[in-house]
Amino acid sequence: MHEARLHHLIGLLYDAAATPELWPTALEAVGDALGGCALVMSILSPREGVKLAATVRIDPDYKALIEQRFASPETNPLVAAMPRLPLTVPVAREAILPDRDYLGGALYNEVFRPQKLAHAAAACVLRTPDHIVPLGIVRQAGAERPDRRDLGLLERLLPHMQRSVQLHLRMASLQARSSAAEEALDHLPFGVILIDADGKVLLLNRSAESVIAAADGLTVREGMLIAATSDETRALGRLVAEAAATGAGAGTSPGGAIALSRPSMSTPLPVLVAPLAGQWTLPATRRAAAAVFVTDPERCATVAGRQLVELFGLTAAEAQLAVALLAGKRLTRIAAERGVQLPTVRNQLRAVLAKTGTGRQAELVRLLATL
């Protein structure tokens, strides 16, 4: 084969590592180079089953049947043979499974015989404790077996296919971790905004998106955080830039805090900025260098109230009282705002102290602050 075509095939294999949807394209090109054969490649996990199944020139209905019935060593003798095959070396099918066993088996008779196909060779692309990757080379029944040239081409391609599969699994693992981290951030009752070394917003969790969408004291413009006034925007930008420099290894600032005014005249937004020195990469080409934490006091009060009901069995009124105490309000003001008598609020306070296992109001506030 001409070297330029070989390099093109290798490039397609590595393209598939980053974009799994391209595996059929890459395998089809390999199949073309082998004289128009069909290919079946699977990434199998003992714990998770079929993680990827890519086929070329296989009827989609039979592809589904392979995934459903013939993806395990118990039902597929070729998969069962993978642990004893040399890695990245194509082996003629009859050397793995004699005609007598193959032609009389369910895999051939239920999947390949109806399509007038038969395995000509197989290879173990990858074998680890967590994954096994078989490759089946399938030709029209009765067609020539792979010749020395075909097997030689496969031997040159299989190490690249193995590396591509390894890269695919590594990126899939990183993506899963990234998705899990984003989901965890979305459960937090306060906003988290990840910033790169240039001060650009990388990611907002759900609470931060809510704050930004309100455009009441903090918003994003051209990827940068913008406050309600130019002075606050400059001050916030300075904190973000200094923290991001520390996170990128080019500074020593620990970040800082700022209260952002709100055009609605609601309670100011408390904002904390801190450097991130870890290797948190979201997305893959941009690393988070700083984190901005923003709290909408009114929203957090609602969330905190629900949590207190769940944690301590408080009534809605008792939870509302506890949140007001945490905000620093006195009992007389709470009674006035709620339109009830002071003795009623004191009775509720006694119930809150009992349910939370605290003895005094100051002790209760300390407990709530830790939550």
Image (tube, rainbow, N blue to C red):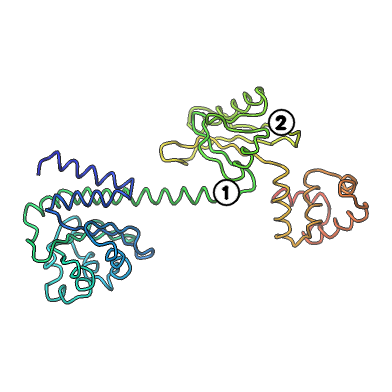
Q: Residue at x 41, y 40 (%)?
A: 284
Q: Residues within 10 Å of mark 1 (few under 14, many from 20)?
A: some
Q: Quadrant of residue 91?
A: bottom left
Of the pair 213 and 231, the residue shown nearer to us: 213
Left or right, 279 with reference to 57: right
Could you say whether the residue bearing mark 2 is in a helix, strand or loop? Answer: loop
Left or right, 361 with reference to 156: right
Left or right, 234 with reference to 119: right
Whether the residues at callouts 2 and 1 have beta carbons within 8 Å, the answer is no
Of the pair 150 and 184, the residue shown nearer to us: 150
Q: Which mark is residue 186?
A: 1
Q: Which mark is residue 261?
A: 2
Identify the amino acid type marked 2: Ser
Q: Residue at x 57, y 39 (%)?
A: 193
Work out which quarter of the rendered image holds the N terminus and state it: top left
Q: Residue at x 41, y 37 (%)?
A: 285
Q: Is residue 303 above or below residue 193?
A: below
Left or right, 92 with reference to 218: left
Could you say whether the residue bearing mark 1 is in a helix, strand or loop? Answer: helix
